[in-house]
Amino acid sequence: MKKIINDPKNVVNEMLDGLAYVHSDLVKRVEGFSIIQRTADKSGKVAIISGGGSGHEPAHFGFIGQGMLSGAICGPIFIPPKAEDIFKLIRFLDKGNGVFIIIKNFEADLKEFSKAIQMAKNENIKVAYIISHDDVSVDKNGFTPRHRGVAGTIFLHKLLGYLSQKGATIEEIEKSALSISANIATLGVATSSVLNPITKKNMFQLDDDQISYGIGIHGESGYKTENIHSSELLANELINKLHIHFKCKKGDRFALLINNLGATSKLEELVFTNDILQLLDLEGVKVKFVKTGHYMNCLNMGGLSVTLMPIKEDWWLEALEAPTLAPSW
């Protein structure tokens, strides 16, 4: 597959330069580092940051802006940034009220972010964190939940960014983060594999007529592979699993995020979104907030994921609907 890039070794650096140019009114790049921070004044607020490997754009840089993230950092394709660089971001953004970190639940990410948090604590910087673990797929044996941090992480960006903007303390943000993260669930389906531009190899194999349920955002294998039939049947598989997870009842209020994993057309995305909404309506679930589009990609992988979050408190919906300058929300 063709890629519109230059030297693969420079792809992340050039991507960050392009981002900083395009959104120069909102964000700036920290010279010499894979760090983007917002230009607006953040004094008096808790800084909210996130990050991980590249290849998931617009996550996380597209969610930097008033009302969402204060800054973000990336590593190479599908590889988290080094602890030393994460620590630099923490130090850049600390204005005395602390830094709250949203970490996706992957072993390599946890290792680097944990080291950076300890480094910050050693310098008496107030830090707290939440581990996003919204993936409710299971392994191929069907027994072990994976709990990876995937597209539902974006809901954390929005709700916690809203709290920071309102002047919440780091302790208040941490308490809310624990409640919110426990109430986000995501499940996805892949229709085609992903080509890593560095290795120039597909990360898994699917025949032209096959799909894989429960695929990960780094191309990790799903829990079931079968032939594709229709959007409605795809939607039914995912909604049934999420329905069981939440034990949905008639009248329950939910926020819905349909995430395009990369290469799926807008036409397909909206057909699928319509099927999801019809199924939820049949179950009597009240969808109070809907987002559909590219939020956390897996490079050029074809597929979609569905994230549901019950509206447990009225302010959660208020936070989702609140304005933000983040360009990708």
Image (cartoon, rainbow, N blue to C red):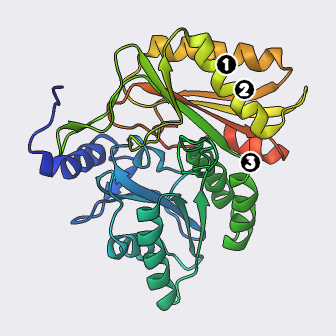
**173 sits to left or right of 35:** right
Residues at circles 1 and 3 in contact by the CB criterion of under 8 Å: no
**Is residue 39 in sight in this rendering?**
no
Q: Looking at the image, which residue is at 78% across and 34% down?
A: 244
Please tell me the numbered disc located at residue 251. Answer: none
- The answer to which of 7 and 318 lies nearer the viewer is 7
- Mark 1 surroundings within 10 Å by alpha-carbon count, few (fewer than 14), some (14 through 19), many (20 or more): some
Q: CA distance from mark 1 to mark 3?
A: 21 Å
**280 sits to left or right of 21:** right
Residue 125: x percent and y percent? Answer: 52, 83
Compared with residue 235, is residue 83 higher up or lower down, i.e. above or below? below
Q: Circle 1 is placed at which residue position?
A: 236
- The answer to which of 299 and 46 lies nearer the viewer is 299
Amino acid type, residue under disc 3 in the picture: Asn
**202 sits to left or right of 135:** left
Q: Which element carries disc 1, helix, strand or loop?
A: helix
Please tell me the numbered disc located at residue 240. Answer: 2
Judged from this view, the residue extending furthest toward the front is 141
- Please report whichever mark, 2 or 3, sits nearer to the chain's N-terminal start: 3
Residues at circles 1 and 2 in contact by the CB criterion of under 8 Å: yes
Q: Circle 3 is placed at which residue position?
A: 183
Residue 260: x percent and y percent? Answer: 47, 28
Compared with residue 71, is residue 277 higher up or lower down, i.e. above or below? above
Amino acid type, residue under disc 1 in the picture: Asn
Q: CA distance from mark 2 to mark 3?
A: 17 Å
Q: Looking at the image, which residue is at 41% across and 71% down?
A: 112
Residue 326: x percent and y percent? Answer: 49, 43
- Please report whichever mark, 1 or 3, sits nearer to the chain's N-terminal start: 3
